[in-house]
Image (cartoon, rainbow, N blue to C red):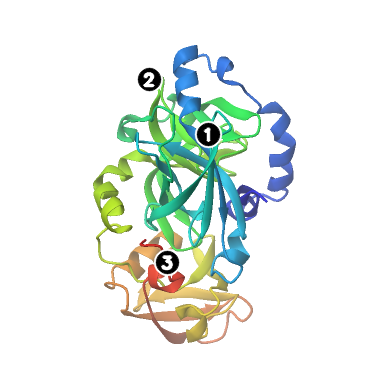
Amino acid sequence: MAIGSRLARVACASGKGVLTAFLLSLATLLVRPAQASHLSSDMAALVVGAMVRVVAEVPREARTADTLGPIREGNGVVIDASGLVLTIGYLVVEATKIELTDAHNKTVPAAVIAYDHETGFGLLRAAVPLDVKPLRIGKSDEVAAGDDALAVSHAGEVVAMPVKVVSRRTFTGYWEYLLENALFTAPAHPAYGGAALVNAEGELLGIGSLLVSEPMPGAEIGLGNMFVPIDELPPILADLLDSGRAQRPDRPWIGVYTNEFMGTVVVTSAADGGPAAKAGLTRGDVLVAVNGDKVRGMEDFLRKLWALGEAGVDVPLDVGSVTDTEAPLRRIVVKSQSRYEFLKLGGGY
């Protein structure tokens, strides 16, 4: 089962029936490379040729197997001549077996060599060099709302699709994730996981992450996608290649999944065996304050959490309840940890 269908139901929390609308839209979104009018046919072929299909197998006992699935399918982009492939990390985190299929339908094994939770990037290395020309890295900071682009995948018949960048803004994920200046595009590409966002010069601008219900706030333009800007990669690439991780201090992670309602941050669940669950946080708890400082939304919660220090720091939370708004606040101290440690990542990353 493709992992995108699992993420669609949570990334589009504000829209009921989003997954149904997504599936119904497939028929209208099938666009072949020749239809991408802002690229020459040669350039479109080059871009599509740099795409690979990614199939990952994850042990059923892995931490992410229940939420992301034991079999995950998506896309990757070849970014160097030795078989280095950039993808979105949730496809491959905790994977023990990876297969890549190129545009010529040649399938080769690959290994996960890096994962970066802060950006969401994952890096793979093909077991043998791929006979494709790598995609050039572009400059995502030069992209503005209103710019045309191309979203490209290698999954079934959906290959290349003209899109528009409709907004640039901070994205906050329910899984303790915050991305500055994310790229939001429309219309939605149905095979977005690990897809490439490219410009008219065939340069890589971003990596597909999510299906979103509101790509442009306040505008009813249907479904769209969120792409991780490619400018997040160069500052950490050497670290990823050398040690499998960016060499920055680990942020405190408490393993809480949240949603926001009019500025109120509500716990929807806690990672089994994670710090929040061990401290007693449960579904329906309201995160009112961090270390006595009132929380004003999910983004504010994360910034206050990370401002406390590095992974391992105690996180004092003032907690209310959605079911008993008159109850006094509880003070719960959560012992944070590194998310990498929780996932017990192996294989050198």
Residue 250 in picture, x, y percent from top left = 30, 67
Amino acid, disc 3: Leu
Question: For the residue carrying disc 1, how many other residues have a C-alpha within 10 Å: few (<14), some (14-19), or many (20+)?
Answer: many
Quadrant, the C terminus: bottom left
Q: Nearer the viewer, residue 55 or 20?
A: 55
Residue 100 in picture, x, y percent from top left = 52, 42
**What residue would you read off at disc 2?**
201
Residue at disc 1, secondary structure: loop
Say if residue 42 shows up in the picture. Answer: yes
Dot in front, 1 or 2: 1
Amino acid, disc 1: Asp
Whole-angstrom CA distance, mark 1 to mark 3, is 27 Å
Marks 1,2: beta carbons within 8 A = no
Whole-angstrom CA distance, mark 1 to mark 2, is 22 Å
**What residue would you read off at disc 1?**
102
Residue at x 33% of width, y 30% of height:
138
Res 345 label: 3
Marks 2,3: beta carbons within 8 A = no
N-terminal of the two: label 1 or label 2? 1
